[in-house]
Image (spheres, helix red, strand yellow):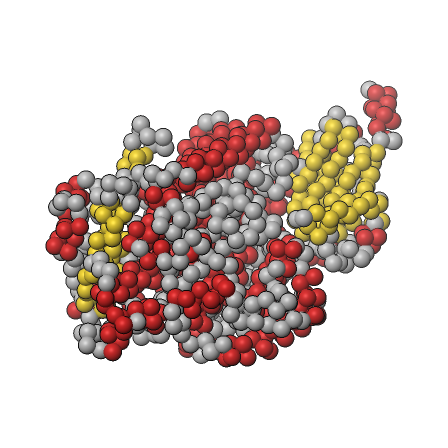
């Protein structure tokens, strides 16, 4: 036996296993590649089949240390600044058997981004590939002084080899942290906290907002904990970092934007500054060169001169608004600006900042006015956008008349609708109200109850607006016709006295015609704010973050559910952190650009009280809103009551494709319900989502129990749907529809003038001026349009649904085949969408404005396209 072992050792002792390590180049490595050679970076293979006893328990046997031997090449690609490839040799030991992981120590003084390690011709294994995609910091930043990376295997906990089990557990312990201390740049800790970082109490009472989350009055999803110290004046409020350091806000290191995405942020920042959007924002980019920072300072210095010289007061006509897209403000030619453009990596982004005398505040023409600059004013287009616009997720079927309120009458008095049958029946093709309801012909866009509790306070700010209800009739050609709009304000005698309401019906001439246009505009103002704060921010960004945190804390990176969901979490935590810093904070951009002002997050928080996880599934949502009924004979198990409903039609196709992919995938790793129940990582993940991430909802009865494959399939489908398709549907159409101020204003400044006043007479004598005096003023318009233009763009490194940034994300052929089928299904959906958009019978797919519905078309180019479904909640 001894001779056999000796011969075996002799057979392998001279074998060298070739390894290739790929790092993404950065400004630290590019000038010092040789510094990484020798013992500055060392790796050791970890056996998946052989254990050894250590002081920390039984774990996989470690191979001999290998060091980076030779820098081989740097390849510049469209998606990276450069991938540097290093060669290394591992002394092969037969006792290693199958390498299931490797350990890496960084003794260099700088961090690097590790992409992959590939081993070639491993005895009895062949090629072994490790996808890492993670930052590796110097050893002093890790308690164990090393990082461990696993191979591309996909394993539920119970099937993890004994040799790797403790490494798997330690990785999760590190990611969970201990819940204390301030988080630093190099940390990888995922933890929960309340939204207690939106206020600036040290700056005065005007910048104080409630703490959202953790109370019955203000329930909210949790966000990522940063551990910053409390403010000086309020120990319950987390201190804020200066606006100039916004990009340094903590998120776990691997959640930060890629280098290319960061370059995009720089470029967008230049554009925002150049359009007069963010005073001081230029200095955020503390890591950019001094020359670029100097350019930002130059822009900031002269921005206010441009603002004052252009006299930002009012638009006087619709033609005045159109000048925004033709060019209004000019800047001189500048060698300095040209040098900055040359430092931005992609030609597309160089075009964001021009230095050749082109307009400073020129915006792309929004799609809604490309074909016809007045089509937005028609009743058909107004109604069509409720089905195919940027917020097609609120309209519901009217099932009682008149509409009633759910607000507590003891607090708010009588809030029921004052719309009567005689207001609408003459427009309903001979049907009575009861007949139309029975025939599923009446629909409502109802913003009354969500808005009314805050409207009195809102109207004490610079905003003056109404809470609205809109009744619509489904015509035989499939289009909706608005019948009546109710405008309500709180009663001057107090909330208990109810409301004062007026009802407006279609009119097209004189003052009444202008009032009808204004009534539709108040509806759009309501819808714009509700969309931004609830349908967009709350229902996608905020509600997904707890799932991201829980997934990283409780599911190993080699867990099948982690691998399934991980692509759909990309960049979201970084975006949300920056949003807390600049958008949703007290005095932030959303408060400045949407009508609820300082009540914005209160409104969002109030609607979270109605949030239920199972209702985020598209079929469940459509049924809840009365727009569909269960029907086993229909393709997706439900039948739409508005047949030409572009969002729902395309959405159900995408939903079914996601569901089919998730089902195929889950069934590879879980053969029955018992295997779901025996997965302790899965059990802890779902417990934490419910009790911590969405802790204010932990006692709700609707949470899935996570005991069956069907429950896991449904839950993962919902998460992927929300993070990808739902977010795409409510985000990337913002500029195509909202980029033209009159179509979708974000605020209103005055109520309808009283008859007999000069302002009322102006409704007839100069209706365009009267309209524009009512909605968002010029400066806030430019600010808001600039913001949504950025939000509506696809970045250069975007990964769309059906694709992954790493093709070798698993070694399981069955999973790879199922994912390939998913991509093929999405490509078929694209063909169907193109075909439907060309069908003239489907009037809601293009409408009077001739904007084809493509927001759920899965793929896209970069930039402002009005289509494309990124994998994750991304901008």
Say left or right for 423 vs 668.
Answer: left
Please tell me which residue is depicted at 28% across the width and 42% down the height of the picture.
478
| Nearer the observer, 620 or 338 | 338
Q: Is residue 687 above or below residue 223?
A: above
Badge count: 0
Residue 653: x percent and y percent?
42, 36
Q: Is residue 599 visible?
A: no
Please tell me which residue is depicted at 82% across the width and 47% down the height of the picture.
71
Say left or right for 43 vs 763.
Answer: right
Residue 473: x percent and y percent?
23, 47
- The quarter of the picture where residue 85 lies is top right
Say left or right for 754 vs 198.
Answer: left
Q: Is residue 9 above or below residue 251?
A: above
Say left or right for 176 vs 376.
Answer: right
Residue 343: x percent and y percent?
70, 61
Residue 840: x percent and y percent?
36, 39
């Amino acid at each position: 036996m001894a001779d056999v072992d000796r011969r075996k050792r002799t057979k392998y002792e001279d074998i060298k296993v070739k390894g290739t390590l790929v790092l993404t180049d950065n400004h630290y490595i590019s000038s010092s590649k040789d510094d990484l050679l020798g013992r500055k970076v060392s790796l050791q293979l970890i056996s998946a089949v052989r254990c050894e006893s250590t002081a920390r328990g039984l774990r996989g046997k470690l191979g001999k240390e290998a060091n980076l031997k030779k820098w081989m090449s740097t390849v510049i690609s469209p998606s990276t600044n450069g991938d540097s490839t290093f060669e290394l040799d591992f002394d092969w030991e037969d006792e290693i058997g199958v390498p299931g992981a490797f350990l890496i120590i960084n003794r260099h003084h700088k961090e690097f981004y590790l992409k992959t390690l590939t081993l070639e011709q491993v005895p009895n294994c062949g090629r072994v590939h490790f996808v890492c995609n993670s930052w590796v910091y110097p050893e002093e930043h890790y308690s164990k002084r090393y990082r461990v990376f696993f191979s591309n295997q996909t394993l539920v906990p119970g099937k993890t080899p004994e040799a790797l089990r403790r490494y798997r557990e330690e990785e999760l312990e590190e990611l969970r942290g201990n819940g204390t201390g301030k988080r630093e740049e190099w940390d990888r800790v995922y933890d929960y906290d309340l939204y207690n970082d939106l206020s600036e109490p040290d700056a005065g009472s005007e910048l104080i907002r409630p703490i959202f989350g953790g109370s019955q009055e203000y329930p909210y999803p949790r966000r990522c904990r940063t551990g910053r110290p409390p403010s000086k004046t309020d120990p319950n409020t987390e201190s804020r970092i200066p606006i100039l350091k916004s990009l340094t806000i903590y998120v776990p290191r691997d959640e930060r934007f890629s280098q290319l995405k960061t370059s995009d942020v720089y470029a967008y920042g230049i554009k925002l500054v150049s359009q007069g959007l963010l005073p001081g924002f230029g200095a955020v980019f503390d890591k950019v060169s001094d020359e670029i920072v100097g350019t930002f300072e130059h822009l900031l210095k002269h921005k206010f001169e441009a603002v004052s010289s252009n006299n930002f007061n009012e638009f006087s006509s619709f033609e005045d608004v159109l000048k925004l897209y033709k060019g209004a403000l000019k800047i001189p030619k500048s060698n300095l600006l040209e040098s900055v453009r040359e430092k931005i990596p992609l030609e597309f982004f160089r075009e964001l900042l021009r230095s050749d005398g082109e307009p400073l505040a020129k915006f792309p023409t929004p799609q809604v006015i490309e074909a016809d600059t007045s089509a937005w004013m028609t009743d058909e287009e107004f109604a069509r956008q409720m089905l195919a616009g940027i917020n097609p997720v609120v309209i519901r079927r009217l099932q009682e008349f008149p509409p009633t309120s759910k607000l507590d009458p003891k607090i708010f008095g009588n809030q029921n609708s004052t719309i009567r049958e005689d207001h609408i029946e003459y427009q309903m093709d001979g049907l009575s109200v009861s007949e139309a309801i029975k025939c599923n012909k009446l629909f409502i866009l109802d913003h009354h109850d969500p808005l009314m509790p805050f409207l009195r306070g809102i109207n004490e700010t610079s905003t003056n607006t109404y809470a609205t209800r809109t009744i619509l009739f489904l015509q035989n050609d499939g289009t909706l016709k608005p019948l009546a709009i109710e405008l309500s304000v709180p009663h001057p005698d107090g909330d208990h006295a109810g409301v004062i309401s007026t009802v407006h019906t279609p009119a097209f001439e004189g003052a009444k015609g202008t009032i009808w246009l204004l009534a539709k505009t108040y509806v759009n103002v309501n819808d714009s704010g509700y969309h931004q704060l609830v349908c967009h921010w709350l229902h996608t960004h905020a509600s997904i973050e707890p799932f991201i945190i829980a997934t990283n804390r409780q599911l190993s990176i080699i867990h099948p559910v982690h691998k399934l969901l991980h692509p759909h979490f990309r960049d979201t935590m970084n975006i949300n952190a920056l949003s807390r810093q600049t958008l949703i904070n007290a005095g932030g951009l959303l408060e400045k650009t949407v009508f609820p002002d300082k009540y914005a997050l209160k409104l969002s928080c109030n609607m979270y009280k109605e949030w239920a996880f199972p209702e985020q599934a598209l079929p469940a949502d459509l049924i809840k809103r009365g727009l569909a009924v269960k029907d086993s004979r229909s393709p997706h198990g439900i039948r739409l009551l508005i047949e030409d409903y572009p969002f729902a039609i395309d959405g159900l196709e995408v939903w079914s494709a996601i569901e089919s992919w998730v089902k195929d995938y889950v069934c590879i790793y879980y053969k029955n319900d018992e295997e779901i129940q025996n997965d302790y990582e899965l059990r802890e993940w779902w417990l934490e989502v419910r009790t911590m991430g969405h802790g204010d909802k932990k006692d709700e009865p609707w949470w899935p129990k996570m005991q069956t494959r069907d429950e896991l399939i449904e839950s993962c489908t919902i998460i992927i749907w929300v993070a990808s398709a739902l977010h795409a549907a409510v985000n990337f159409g913002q500029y195509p529809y909202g980029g033209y101020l009159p179509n979708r204003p974000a605020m209103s400044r005055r109520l309808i003038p009283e008859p007999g006043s000069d302002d009322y007479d102006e409704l007839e004598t100069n209706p365009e001026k009267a309209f524009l005096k009512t909605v968002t003023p010029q400066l806030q318009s430019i600010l808001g349009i600039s913001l949504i233009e950025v939000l509506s763009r696809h970045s250069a490194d975007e990964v769309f649904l059906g694709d992954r940034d790493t093709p070798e994300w698993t070694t399981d052929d069955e999973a790879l085949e199922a994912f390939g089928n998913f991509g093929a299904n999405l490509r078929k959906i694209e063909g169907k969408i193109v075909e439907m958009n060309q069908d003239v019978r489907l009037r809601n797919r293009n409408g009077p404005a001739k904007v084809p519905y493509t927001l759920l078309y899965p793929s896209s180019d970069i930039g402002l396209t009005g289509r494309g479904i990124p994998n994750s909640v991304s901008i």
